[in-house]
Image (cartoon, rainbow, N blue to C red):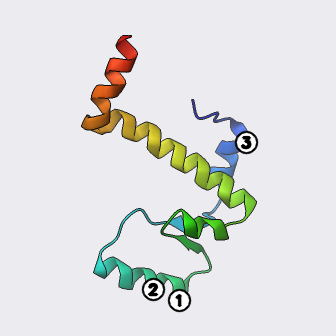
Amino acid sequence: MLNINNDIKEIYSKDPEYINILAFNENGQSLIKEIKNKSNLEIVTTNKSAQNLSAFQKNKFEIEQNSRKIYKLFTNTKNQTKFISFLQK
């Protein structure tokens, strides 16, 4: 489903390439600023900020986005009903 193979497993076994922040509040925002000052990792807070990633990092980011979409299909009750209806056809 996600086309995961040994190459991808090897990629994810290495150190992180970037930090992908899914949500944050005011406290989180100040923490993000502190992380930016102390870390060399790229911080991704929006899809637009992912444009700054290298081609390798963008590929990794895309895999993670697709994984989240699949997870959401099974955990989001609003979409879950639509998905179950689709499977029953």
Q: Residues within 10 Å of mark 3 (few under 14, many from 20)?
A: few
Q: Are marks 1 and 3 in contact (CB under 8 Å)?
A: no
Q: Earlier in the sequence, mark 3 or mark 2?
A: 3
Q: Residues within 10 Å of mark 2 (few under 14, many from 20)?
A: few
In space, the residues marked 2 and 1 are separated at their CA atoms by: 6 Å
Q: Nearer the viewer, residue 88 or 33?
A: 88
The residue lying at 32 percent from left, 27 percent from top is 82
In space, the residues marked 3 and 2 are separated at their CA atoms by: 33 Å
- Relative side of 41 to 55, left or right: left
The residue lying at 45 percent from left, 85 percent from top is 33
Q: Badge 2 is on which residue?
A: 33
Q: Earlier in the sequence, mark 1 or mark 3?
A: 3
Judged from the image, the secondary structure of the residue bearing numbered disc 1 is helix
In this picture, is 16 found above or below 29?
above
- Relative side of 72 to 7, left or right: left
Q: Are marks 2 and 1 in contact (CB under 8 Å)?
A: yes
Query: What amino acid does circle 3 point to?
Result: Asp
Query: What amino acid does circle 2 point to?
Result: Lys
In space, the residues marked 1 and 3 are separated at their CA atoms by: 32 Å
> Mark 3 or mark 2, which is nearer to you?
2
Judged from the image, the secondary structure of the residue bearing numbered disc 2 is helix
Q: Badge 1 is on which residue?
A: 37
The residue lying at 41 percent from left, 39 percent from top is 71
Q: Badge 3 is on which residue?
A: 7
Q: Nearer the viewer, residue 79 or 35?
A: 79
Judged from the image, the secondary structure of the residue bearing numbered disc 3 is helix
Q: Nearer the viewer, residue 55 or 81?
A: 81
